[in-house]
Amino acid sequence: MFRINHAYGLFGIFSSIFLNPGFALAHTANISSSRIVPEPKAYYRVDVGFLGSDIERMLIENKEALAGVDLTEPGLFESYIGKFIQDRISMQNEEGVACASAVVAVGEDPANPGDSRVVIRFDCNKVQGKIFYNPLKLIEAQGPRAKHLVGVGEKDAGNNLTEAQHAGREPAPGQVMIFPGDRPIDLAEPLLGPWELAPKFFFAGMEHIVTGYDHLCFLLAVVLWATHVWPIVKIVTAFTISHSVTLTLAALELVKLPGNWIETAIAASIIYVALENFYTRRVDGRWKDTFAFGFIHGFGFASGLIELGVPQRAVAPSLASFNIGVEVGQIGVVLIVMPLLLLIDRYVTHRARSAKLVYALSGVIALFGAYWMLARLGIIAG
């Protein structure tokens, strides 16, 4: 059976689509992937991977087509998802002539537990000229912030190219990140090298911290009492050191922890640092908080990198650039928040940090943390 990567399962997807569409629309744009494997006689196998939240978006966007359809009938739900993906990716030549395609399988991705996979086979025997891979309709369906990681060759393919791959007659192993508005991929051309791929991971890291509201709440809570630069430097540096360790370990799959444990612990860390603001105004020692909790948040950052997929031939630059992107993002947030607080100190509260402001913001942050923790524990609806 097809696996939905959410605790509420198939029933939850039906209810989120037909009863409460705003819930699913609250998800951030999803990241999908394709692995193109050339086969003999101009055939290609394409494995398309995605998370359960991708399915929600797909069904919400196309719920009119589901009117009157009983998706509880065995196999019908899988068939619909397979057809959805098949209609949104193509192998084609420069003139747009598409290769014939057929859905081979729909189900769990055995290589990535928790992910789902659609396998499609393309027959390009009757298509003349160079072959291009076009996933842009799928990216468009996922939203303006969607990303699509494309790999060529089996996952364990080595770096030694065949004569045909050197000559451009067959696609060579490699990976490339596709964004909305990019062009289809020319399979006769080499894909991006490790350091060419790095900038896209850098911007993905920045986006992950800027749109990671739980991480932002944690960071905001620990700097609310800060009025000088040095404590902030220690806070950010300690956080960077510790989360870099667990980000690397988790992204390389050297350490694996259940995602719901990590997300719940992150919510608890937010509650802790927010409530701490009610009992102490000292910020000199709060680098100890960020150092300790940074190990937990690192696993959370790693989830974003794992969704992107760490390229086998570009592990070091991908990890480094993603982590640097996270750091630049959090430094940017601090550089926005601190001047605002200092301006309030100067012009509103006569050069003193307002206790009422800190308590109010800390209370709101603590409530957010409590909500996230209860939702992640399944006690309330998320």
Image (cartoon, grey):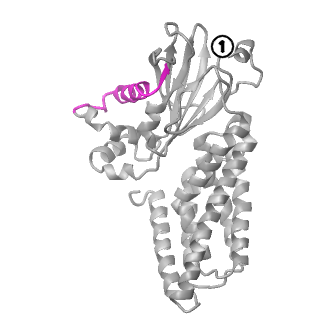
> Which residue in the rendered view is the most extreme toward the bottom?
350
- Residue 339 lies in quadrant: bottom right
Front in this rendered view, residue 261 or 158: 158
> Which residue in the rendered view is the most extreme toward the right?
160
> Which residue in the rendered view is the most extreme toward the front?
95
Would you say residue 3 is visible in this rendering?
no
The quadrant of the rendering that contains the N terminus is: top left
Note whether 241 is above or below 350 in the view shown. above
The residue segment tinted magenta is 68-91
Q: Secondary structure at mark 1?
A: loop
Q: Which residue lies at the image location 54% right of the left edge and 32% below the top edge?
A: 109
- Sort mark 1 into few (<14), some (14-19) or many (20+) by Cα contacts within 10 Å: some
* 31 falls in the magenta region: no
Note whether 375 is above or below 31 in the view shown. below
The residue that label 1 is drawn on is 169
- Residue 201 lies in quadrant: top right
Q: Is residue 230 left or right of residue 371?
A: right
Q: Which residue lies at the image location 60% right of the left edge and 54% below the top edge?
A: 206
Note whether 244 is above or below 363 in the view shown. above
Q: Amino acid at mark 1?
A: Arg
Q: Which residue lies at the image location 75% right of the left edge and 24% below the top edge?
A: 158
Q: Is residue 372 left or right of residue 68?
A: right
Instruction: Tell me where residue 148 appears, x and y as whole percent.
Output: 54, 36
- Residue 227 lies in quadrant: bottom right
